[in-house]
Image (spheres, helix red, strand yellow):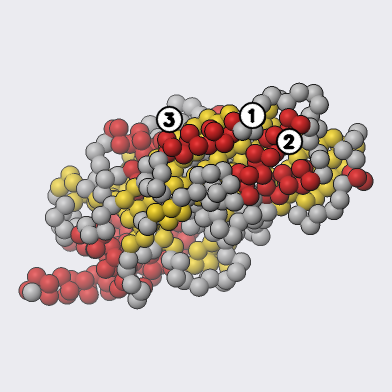
Amino acid sequence: MVQQRRDDEADSLLKADVDAYVDEVWEDVVEDIRSLVKIRSVEDRGKAAPGMPWGPASHEALSAALALAGRLGLEAHDCEGYIGYADLPGDSSKQVATIAHTDVVPEGLGWHSDPFDVTRRDGFLVGRGVLDDKGPFVLSLYAAHFFVRHVKRGGTRLPYTLRCIVGNNEETGMSDLDWYLAHFPEPAFCFSPDADFPLICGEKGHLTGEFRSQNIDDSGRIVALDGGTVSNAVPGEASATVEAAVSGLPADPHVDREDLGSGRVRLVAHGKGGHASLPAGTVNAIGILVEYLLHNELCSAQERAFLEMEQQLLKASDGSLVGVACADEKFGPLTLIGGTVHKQGHHFEQTVDSRFPTATTGESLAAALAAFGERYSCSFALSTIDKPFYVDPALPEIACLLKTYEEYSGRPGKTVTIGGGTYARRFRRAAAFGPHDPADVVPAWVGIEHGPDEAISEESLRRALKIYIVSIARLMRLEL
C-alpha cells in the first residue's frame, strides 16, 4: 500500500512534467517530422550499394533519423545501413525498446497537398509518413529525450537501457529487423508505435506471392497492363493499352479512354485504394479494368484466361471466390487482395497479399492459390509467409501500457488483433501501441496510412507522446 501511494505520487509529478515538456517541444516535434517527410524514402534495391541495402533514399532517411537521435542526446548507431538504433544507457544492459520505421510506401494518386511535406490543416498534419511511421518515430525519439533530460538533471540512470530502434525496411518485408535480430539480442520488452490504440496483441499471418500467366502469342490485344504501386495496398488506379478503336468503346464512369492513334487506346480505371489488411470499403482499380476488358472483349483467348482469373481473385477480398475463405475467433476473417499487375514481355504478373487467421496455415493457403491459378493456366510463386503473432494480454507489460492509455484517453484499455503486420510480430515480448485511435472522430477528408492525404491530428499525436513517456517510466519499474 505504501509503495502504491509512492507510485501514485510519483506519477502525479511525472504527468505534470510531461505536460510541460510536450508543450515546450511540440513545434520542434512538428518540424522534425517535416524534415523526415520531405525525404521520399521508398525502397529502391536497384540502386542499392554498400551501406545502403535498401537504396539511397531510404538510407538518407535513416541517416537523418540517426542524426536527430544524436541531437536529442541519444547514442546513435548505423548498422551497416540495414537498420539503426539509439540508446540511453541504463543501470542494466536489459532493454526497454521502441521500434518505428523511416521508410514509406510510394505516394500514389489523389493528394490535395504535397505528399512530401507536412501541411497543417484543421488541426491535422498531412503528408506521407505522418501516421505511418515517421510521425510516430519522431515521437519515440522525443519520448526518449524526456528521459535524457531527466538523467542529466537528476544524475540517476534508468534501471534499464532505453533503446529506440530505427527501422528502414518495414514496408517491404522487414528484412532490416531480420538482420538486427541476427546480430543483437532481443529487448526485454518492445513496443512499436505503428498501429492503433488501445493495444495490438496479435497480428494475422501474412502471405505474399505472384501469379504469372502463360506466354501470350501475337494474337493478344493488350499491349500494356499496369496497376498499383506496391503489393501490400489495394490499388486506386490501373491502366491498359489495347488494340482497338476508341469510337467502338462505351463510356464508363470509372474508366477513362484516350485515343493514342494507330489503332490503340489507353484505358485508365479509377477505384478506391487502401491498405491490404483493411480492404473493406476499397475498390480495386485492377478489378474495374479487368471487367471492362472482358465485357468489351478486348482480349485474345489466352489473355481471357488470365483476366478471368483476375475477375475471381479481385471481386471478393475475403478469398471466397478463390476457395480460401476462413475465420477464427481471435483474428476474424482472412483477407486476400491483388496489389500490382504488369505485363512483362509476353506474360502478365499479378501480386497477391493475404492476411490469414489460425484457421489455416500459410502452406495450405499457398497450395490452394497454386491450384486456383492452374485452372486458368497460371502459375503461382510464393514469396513470403509469416505465421500469426500473438502475445499474452495478461503480461504485466501489456497491463502497464493499457493502464496508461486509459488514463490519458478516458476510454477502456483492451487488447485487439489486426490484419496488418508490424515489427512487434518478430519479437517474443512485444506489442503494437498507437498512435492512431480509431475512436477519434475525424473529418471525411482525412486519409489513412498508404492512402492519399494521409493525416493524423496534432492533438492525438500530443496525447500519444504523453502516453509513451509515462508508459516507458512505468515499464522501468517492472521486473523484466
Q: CA distance from mark 2 to mark 3?
A: 45 Å
Q: Are marks 2 and 3 in contact (CB under 8 Å)?
A: no
Check disc 3 and report the residue beneath it.
51
Q: Position of residue 269 (x, y in %)?
A: 73, 49
Q: Position of residue 436 (x, y in %)?
A: 44, 63
Q: In the image shown, does 378 or 187 lie closer to the viewer?
A: 378
Check disc 2 and report the residue beneath it.
304
Q: Position of residue 61 (x, y in %)?
A: 47, 43
Choose top left, top right, bottom left or bottom right for residue 362. top left
On screen, residue 393 versus residue 167, left or right, reads left
Badge 2 or badge 1: first in the primary sequence? 2
Q: Amino acid at mark 2?
A: Arg
Q: Residues within 10 Å of mark 2 (few under 14, many from 20)?
A: some
Q: CA distance from mark 2 to mark 1?
A: 11 Å
Check disc 1 and report the residue beneath it.
377
Dot label at residue 233? none
